[in-house]
Amino acid sequence: GQQLNQSPQSMFIQEGEDVSMNCTSSSIFNTWLWYKQEPGEGPVLLIALYKAGELTSNGRLTAQFGITRKDSFLNISASIPSDVGIYFCAGDRTNFGNEKLTFGTGTRLTIIP
Amino acid sequence: DAGVTQSPTHLIKTRGQHVTLRCSPISGHKSVSWYQQVLGQGPQFIFQYYEKEERGRGNFPDRFSARQFPNYSSELNVNALLLGDSALYLCASRPTLPGGGYEQYFGPGTRLTVT
């Protein structure tokens, strides 16, 4: 099935560093969502974006809905050990009558002690 | 408030068998979707149900079926299991009240292993 292109695939950073990851698509989405998943658990919603150009923050996390509606970005500032996990972007075309979420390939974040 | 709940948490089946997975959405959510997540990949959409009707279907064979009950809980059924059906099966619910967002909330998943 289709998956969005997410990069980087993995990141190894030190505690306190900032993190940036992005997600691109060949199709337009009306909603972009960012999820975090830890081993053996379901994805947990971090941020939802509804308008092109929108910039939304949730604590140390900031995400942006690309102007073209074909991409989105997630930044994490001053990383801490509990940020470890896999981050997924997901696009939603609900306004087009389709509630299916299309997920990215994931970015695995590891914090080096 | 309780989140999305799924049962069982883990399941081991043999090829050719049938399996039923269950999901209870967040209270007040009427839309339920099912996703399959193979190890190392993002979730893939299987079905979406709203008010007991199928509203969307992903690219999965007819061995996969689902239904939604009057209390909005849902079941996913898979017949004639194959080794490739081994995955984490996720259920998600979404608010559908006026002004509700389009975000979907996921349960912890059911880990299915087919041997």
Image: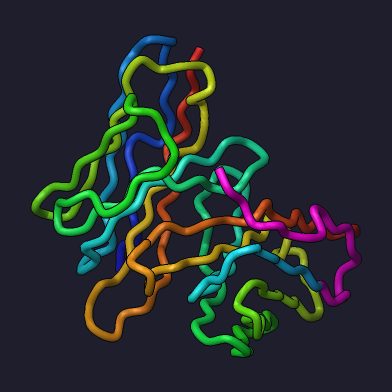
Report x, y in % for residue A50: 49, 82
Identify the image quadrant of the C terminus of chain A. Answer: bottom right
Q: Residue at x 31, y 80 (%)?
A: B100
Identify the residue at image location x=28%, y=39%.
B22
Q: Is residue A85 visible?
A: no
> Which quadrant of the view contains residue B101?
bottom left
Q: Position of residue B75 (x, y in %)?
A: 24, 39
Viewer-proximal residue, A108 or A111? A108
Question: How has the structure been colored for display?
Answer: rainbow
Q: In the displayed structure, does residue B15 sit left or right of residue B7?
A: right
Task: Judge whether residue A109 can be spotted in this image.
Answer: yes
- Residue at 35% over, 34% down: B8
Q: Residue furthest left?
A: B70
In reply to whether residue B89 is colored magenta, the answer given is: no
A26 relative position to B77: left or right: right
Residue B71 vs residue B8, the one in the foreground: B71
Q: Is A90 placed above or below B88 here?
A: below
Image coords of residue A70 (percent x, y): 64, 72
Q: Does A109 sit left or right of B37 as displayed?
A: right
Where does residue B9 sit, x and y in percent of width and height?
A: 41, 36
Q: Quadrant of the N terminus of chain A?
A: top right
Numbered label tally: 0
Q: Residue at x 33, y 24 (%)?
A: B63
Chain part drawn in magenta: A1-19
